[in-house]
Amino acid sequence: MSTNYPHLFSPLRIGNVTLKNRIATAPMGSEPNTSGFLSEQNLAAFENRAKGGAAIVTRGETLVHAHTGSAHGNLCNLDNEGFMPSHLQLTDRIHQHNALANIEILHSGARAHPQYTNGIIYGPSAQPGVYGVDVTPMDEDIMNEIADAFAHGAYVAKFGGFDMVMVHGGHGWLLSEFLSPLYNTRTDKYGGSIENRARFPLMVIDRIRKAVGPNFPIEIRISGDEFMEGGYGIDDAIEFAKMLDGKVDLIHVSATSFRDVNSGCRMFPSAFLPHGVNVYLAEAIKKHVKTPIATVGSLSDPAEMEDIIASGKADVIYVGRQILADPEFPNKAKAGRFDEVRPCVRCNHCLSLDFVPYVDMCSGISQCVVNPEVGRDLKEGMYQPKPLPKKVLVIGGGPGGMQAALKAEEQGHEVILIEKADRLGGMLNVAVHDVSFKEDLGKYMQYLIRMVERKAIQVRLNTTATPELIQEIAPDTVVCAVGAEPIIPRIPGVDRENVVKVTQLRDPGLEFGEKVVVIGGGLVGCEEGLALAMEGKDVTVLEMQEKLAPDAPILHLKAMMLEYEKRTENLHPYTEVTVTSIEDDGVHAKDKDGKEVIYPADTVLLSVGMRSKIDEVEKLRTNDAEFITVGDCIKPGKILQAVSGGYFAGKNA
């Protein structure tokens, strides 16, 4: 047993397998091709999760009845034995690292896409479908067919080397639709009471058990609460769990249903929610059953996880986004090196890439804002030859510059990092402040600074880069990460004393008046407006375009707009507004109809975008060394571009 978090790293026996610890990777995919087959890159992604030390590695969304249950086109399915080589290769990669292989099996039910189901959508009851085709109520013949398909899928998974199956009975997929009064309005023996609504899901579990035998572990994922008016709550979830007790080996408690367009903000808890926000649901269910209980939802601190296990709130903890941010999270925590874990910032960029139907199209790739190796696991995560040592000068101590320095040092180079300010962090020092939804971003900034300080990197603060200094240092490679500067719009009054640039937000002594107008409703302006409103200021956010924060990941945007809706008394967003001047009485503007409007303001915050420091970059460019630009000094972007660019600048220096 580990002396670091002894309960978290204690074993647990379920069915015929033993978990080496209580950490499991949540069901996640890895951009299989359009036919659902796994590539070498996909296999490497799952293998890296297994290498990181999790007890269970779970393959996500896998169909059991493709011709009626497919919601999108790149899903593997278990009713096609042609996928067997993928299954066997995947489980082999996971087993090589002493981890258990799990697979999430499901039917999309009323959320299936008619494009993939010959135009027929099945569900518990008749109602409008998500994609414009009405749902066909399931009769007992199709129920039996699909229950048998679940059983066959579990059998195929067992044959393919998986150590267990996770039956998806939550989130608004078919089995949870039977449980939910919002989907299930039947008046026969499959509708009405929770006992009747649970009849078909229990049929599925019984068929699976018969197919896989008494010892093969069956896990079921349920929503502990749908959090929707008319949906089921924790009481029904407890009753269903009691019916499952003894039939399954692990009950995995998540939350919400895709029927709510904002459900993803709780299903994959956003930065606006506390860590572990769903743990209480697992705890409530655990009190009523003997079956081990798993919890999930924005858990990333091993001390918190240790308390959950030690206090009996849950038996297993599923981790998704934190494993993407740092697959080595379990190993580092066990070794007492948690302060070296790259933290997830809960921006939900990873999930938003393919979050149909809420985004226009699937990207088909995997990305993580803080971990550039995600989606490149085969190329970056495997064995790489070290280059010949060089002297690398990194100019700029923001996230891109720090990541470049870290990767260059890892490659064996001599690294000098210079920063003109008196501390590292760059624009993160502006973005991070004392507001709850910035907490994770702050942890990431401190992680980068901490790792730079621990490595053999020479850091020179209060140092301005000049051609002369570059010549004196004589590097082989210069990585230029000097960032960007705020755009100052040509608006009369923009130079008034009460006008603050977004880069000045953390200046010592800066105070905001009670009425604040934010000019610019991009992601930064919207977040800063929200932060000010949370501090009690009366805030107006003005945006020229039709929509607020169009550059935000869709799940983060939805979560942020939910926060806006909570604060309508002191947070007022307006779109299609053109600012004409800033006067004594406030910000003058024209609305979309050309009507002149005055927005009273004690303080005006400018957040209309950033401009690359092209002149500064070109003054530093030298022909005596390889010169690589990174992040905002190429073009203004997000942390993703800065960190990814820094990683490859350091690697290729």
Image (spheres, helix red, strand yellow):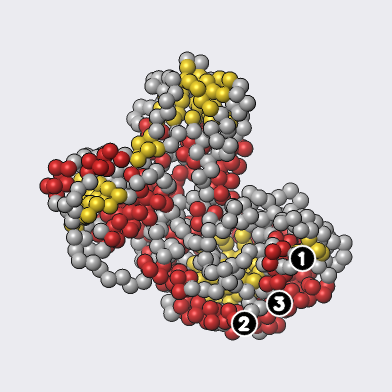
Residue 327, percent from left and from top: 42, 65
In-image side of 628 versus 181 (left or right): left
Is 476 above or below relative to 148?
A: above
Kind of element beneath mark 1: loop
CB under 8 Å between callouts 1 and 3? no
Can you name the residue that lies furthest to the front here?
623
What is the spatial separation of the Cα atoms under label 2 and label 3, in whole angstroms?
A: 13 Å
Marked residue nearer the N-terminal end (2 or 1)? 2
Kind of element beneath mark 2: helix
Amino acid type of the residue tagged 2 in the rendering:
Glu
Query: Along the line of sight, which residue is nearer the eye, 402 or 290?
Result: 402
Crowdedness of circle 2 by 10 Å Cα count: few (<14), some, many (20+)?
few
The quadrant where residue 500 appears: top left
Residue 440, percent from left and from top: 44, 49
Q: Quadrant of the N terminus?
A: bottom left
Crowdedness of circle 3 by 10 Å Cα count: few (<14), some, many (20+)?
many
Q: Which residue is disc 3 drawn over?
A: 149
Q: Which residue is disc 1 drawn over?
A: 120
Residue 301, percent from left and from top: 45, 57
Crowdedness of circle 1 by 10 Å Cα count: few (<14), some, many (20+)?
some
In-image side of 281 versus 455 (left or right): right
CB under 8 Å between callouts 2 and 1? no
The quadrant where residue 343 appears: bottom left
Marked residue nearer the N-terminal end (2 or 3)? 2
Kind of element beneath mark 3: helix
Is 609 above or below relative to 425?
A: above
Please name the residue shown 63% across and 77% down the image.
78
